[in-house]
Amino acid sequence: MRYNRLMDLGLSQQQIEDNLIFGDAKVGDTMTVAMRKEDAKTWFGVAPPDLSVIARSRGADWLYTYLRGFYRDESAVTGWNNVVFPNVAMPHVLSSLQGVQRLRTGEGGDHGAAHSELVLETPGTMSVQAYDAMIRDLVNYLEYMAEPESVKRVRIGIIVLIFLGLMAVLTWLLKREYWKDVQ
């Protein structure tokens, strides 16, 4: 993805240069990841996935739940685990914003079945509502980054369906007019 594609979201070139480009990169250059894959593999045992690809393959709902599902787990290598993706190698990089959650399991609920829930143990710098809104915005951005042309493709698809519907009605009216005298 290139920096200038952010203009599709309503950002000006000046805003992109002032707030998002660090170093000597230009607006037309491709965005790069600050962490090298070799370092990530050394630190976490595996290179972290590109979350824009995850948004495209698993969907925005899965990614939203994943980013909200981290909890403190001392037995994990990174000290964090996830309810959606158990034994995840990715640490919870947004923990200072969300706070520390713990996974509480218990029995009861419907018909005595075991259940698990995340409980906020230590609040972060953001409220729960503000954190959820920020994650929603982040997931929407990652979904856009995964496939920026999807908005245009959906718009064209709607136009094509309207056109086909109109042509079907006109074709039916023409057939009715043509065959009205035939028994």
Image (cartoon, helix red, strand yellow):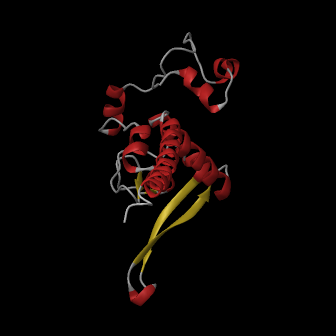
Identify whether 32 is placed above or below 140. Answer: above
**Is residue 165 shown above or below 118?**
above
Q: Using the rendered image of the protein, determine whether residue 166 is visible from the camera's viewpoint.
A: yes
Is 88 placed above or below 153 here? Answer: below
Which residue does the image show at 47% across and 19% down from the upper left?
Answer: 30
- Quadrant location of residue 127? bottom right
Q: Please identify the quadrant where the C terminus is shown.
A: bottom left
Write the residue at 50% across / 21% down.
Answer: 2
The image shows residue 104, relative to residue 71, as above or below, that is below
Query: Number of marks in the image?
Result: 0
Residue at horizontal 46 percent and vertical 47 percent from the top: 164
Q: Does residue 44 appear left or right of residue 133 in this picture?
A: left
Counting from the top left corner in percent of width and height, residue 180 is at 45, 60
Task: Give how far across and how far down residue 130 sits, in percent.
Answer: 67, 52
- Would you identify the image quadrant in which residue 53 lies? top left
How far across and how far down the image is residue 173, in percent?
A: 49, 55
In this orientation, does residue 67 appear? no
Q: How far across and down, in percent of the image, does residue 73 sit?
A: 41, 57
For this rendering, which residue is in front, 20 or 81? 20
Front residue (pair 80, 169): 169
Return the residue found at the far bottom. 111
Residue at 66% across, 24% down:
19
48 relative position to 96: left or right: left
